[in-house]
Structures are given as C-alpha cells and as structure tokens.
Amino acid sequence: AQKVTQVQTEISVVEKEDVTLDCVYETRDTTYYLFWYKQPPSGELVFLIRRNSFDEQNEISGRYSWNFQKSTSSFNFTITASQVVDSAVYFCALSGSSNTGKLIFGQGTTLQVKP
Amino acid sequence: EAGVAQSPRYKIIEKRQSVAFWCNPISGHATLYWYQQILGQGPKLLIQFQNNGVVDDSQLPKDRFSAERLKGVDSTLKIQPAKLEDSAVYLCASSLTDQSHYEQYFGPGTRLTVT
C-alpha cells in the first residue's frame, strides 16, 4: 500500500521566518515520484515540484527548497523568508510505478503567514 | 495554453437529488482524473480515464456515482442520489499520459454542498 503522511496539520509563522513542511511516504515501488502542490484559498491546486526516486539531489527554486531523503522516506519542503502570499494549504503527493499515474495525497499542511 | 475547465464552480442540492459536473481537460491530454476532496483532507482519486477508457475506478461508489468521457475529451461526473457525505470539492485533472512522472494539471474544482 502507498501512503503519504504530512507531519504538521497547521503551521503559523510571522513574515520573514523560515518554515519547513514535513512529508513522510510509504511505498514498495522502487521507482516512484514525489510532488508538492500548493492550494491557495481560490482552491486550484498549483504544481510546485516533482522528484523521482533516483534523484536525491536537493533542489532550490527562489525561496523554495526541497530535501529528499530516501533513507528516511521523507520529502520536506522549506520556504525561506516567508511572505503573506505563501499562506495556503500545501500537499505532498506520491505516484508509484505500480500506479496508473494517480496521485496519493497527504492530508495537507495549512500554512498561515502573518504580517 | 488554456487550463483545465470545470463547471459549475458551486452547487447546492438537497440529499437524494442528482447533480452533474463537467470537465474539459487541456487540449491533447489523454489522461483525465476526477478527485474528491473532503474538507480538511487531501484529494482522493475517484476515477481515471485514458482517452475514453476507464483505467481505475476502484474508489468510485458505483451505486451512486457515474462518469463518462465519451469522445476522449471532456468528461462528466454524476451523483444520483446524493448523500450528505458527498459534500466536497470535486477536482478534475489532466495529464499527457498515465505515466506516473507526468505532471497533473488541476481545474478550479466544483464545490458541492448537500443539505
């Protein structure tokens, strides 16, 4: 069975603080893909990043960075110098090679960034 | 490029009534997904189409839910009769193919309230 667990349900920070959202996954597939999506109040899921199971290099995109550690089955997401516009629900998701492309989502982490 | 279109955006019905949602995927995308997102949870796959064929409907409550994608382009999801627990956001997504590494693009969703 495949499962995604997002450790934090809600996080509240003050603007300019760094914040890390934790994601732990379970899968028996040797080839799989991990995703992060952002869901702002408007409701549409916005793709942020995709990593495959063979690439454990960390990735940085502006204020966003991702740390993938296969040894601990974790795929954590850090926002540096958070901004009010980062307030949203963030979802970690998994798609394994035994799937047909469907995404298995975690329950989401609600991030509130206060001015 | 136009995104995934969904309508209506909001719908309120009474229990035991029927309702239908429509989705138009991104042009050229062979794979179409319907997800159900209950408040406070991550999206859960209901049904997946590859062109006009069903790939995965294992989590679709077939006694009341039905979906079709007759010409391999747009799709409709129907609930008949609706129950209170069907209150959720119904998200449509599309991707180029059903391979697990392809990004899924999500529509804005239809928020259903069953009273």
Image (cartoon, coloured by chain):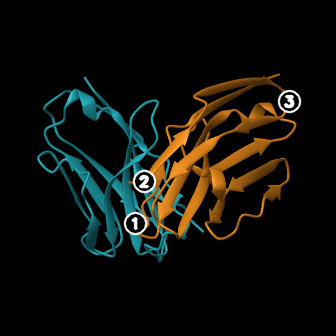
Q: Chain of mark 1?
A: A
Image point (85%, 40%), residue name? A80
| Disc 3/disc 2 C-alpha distance (Å) | 33 Å
Indicate the amino acid at tag 1: Asn
* Front disc: 1 or 2: 2
Return the residue found at the far front.
A71
Residue receiving disc 2: A2
Chain B pictured colour: cyan
Mark 1: few/some/many CA within 10 Å (<14, 14-19, 20+): some
Circle 1: element type:
loop
| First in residue order: circle 3 vs circle 1 | 3
- What residue did someone put label 1 on? A99
Q: Residues within 10 Å of mark 3 (few under 14, many from 20)?
A: few
**Residue A74 placement (x, y as % from top left):** 63, 49
Compared with A9, A93 (above or below) is below
**Residue at 83% from the left image edge and 22% from the top image edge:** A115
The answer, for residue A42, to whether it is visible in the render is yes
Question: Which chain is displayed in orange in the rendered image?
Answer: A
Amino acid carrying mark 3 in the image: Glu
Which comes sooner in the sequence, label 1 or label 2?
2
Where in the figure is residue A99, as x and y percent of width and height?
Answer: 40, 66
Q: Which residue is mark 3?
A: A17
User: Mark 1–mark 2 contact, CB under 8 Å?
Assistant: yes
- Looking at the rendering, which quadrant does residue B76 occupy? bottom left
Q: Tell which of A4 and B25 is nearer to you.
A: A4
Are discs 3 and 2 located on one and the same chain? yes
